[in-house]
Image (cartoon, helix red, strand yellow):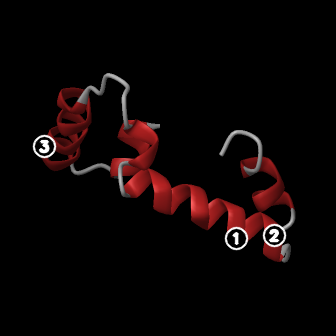
Amino acid sequence: MIEIGETTVAEPESYDARANHVWCATLALNGVVGGGVPQDWATHMIGHEITALFRIDYKKVVS
């Protein structure tokens, strides 16, 4: 994502950039990129709580 994110935003018509972006997101959502590394889901869940308590956009909390 670090390598292709900027290109995806700068060139939204680029099929290759969008395809790579979606592929990376799919792998991340399925947990493939987290295999074998320590994970901290407590912090992630705090983001959900902050969103609910203060009625703010979740994306702003986790960014």
Question: Residue 11's quadrant in the figure?
Answer: bottom right
Q: Is residue 13 above or below residue 48?
A: below
Mark 2 or mark 3: whose residue is earlier in sequence: 2
| Residue drawn at point x = 58 percent, y = 55 percent | 24
| Residue drawn at point x = 22 percent, y = 51 percent | 55
In percent of width and height, residue 46 lies at 18, 33
Mark drawn on residue 19: 1
Mark drawn on residue 53: 3
Dot 2 amino acid type: Asp
Q: In what element is the residue under mark 1?
A: helix
Q: Is residue 19 above or below residue 59?
A: below
Relative depth, front residue between 53 and 23: 23
Q: How far separated are the C-alphas under marks 1 and 2?
A: 5 Å
| Residue drawn at point x = 26 percent, y = 26 percent | 40
In percent of width and height, residue 15 lies at 80, 76
2 relative to 59 in the view: left or right: right
- Residues at badges 1 and 2 in contact (C-beta under 8 Å)? yes
Dot 1 amino acid type: Ala
Q: In what element is the residue under mark 2?
A: helix
The mark total stands at: 3
Give the labeled residue for mark 2: 16
Query: Between tags 2 and 3, which lies in front?
Result: 2
10 relative to 19 in the view: left or right: right
Q: How far separated are the C-alphas under marks 1 and 3?
A: 36 Å
Dot 3 amino acid type: Leu
37 relative to 13 in the view: left or right: left
In percent of width and height, residue 60 lies at 42, 43
Query: Between tags 1 and 3, which lies in front?
Result: 1
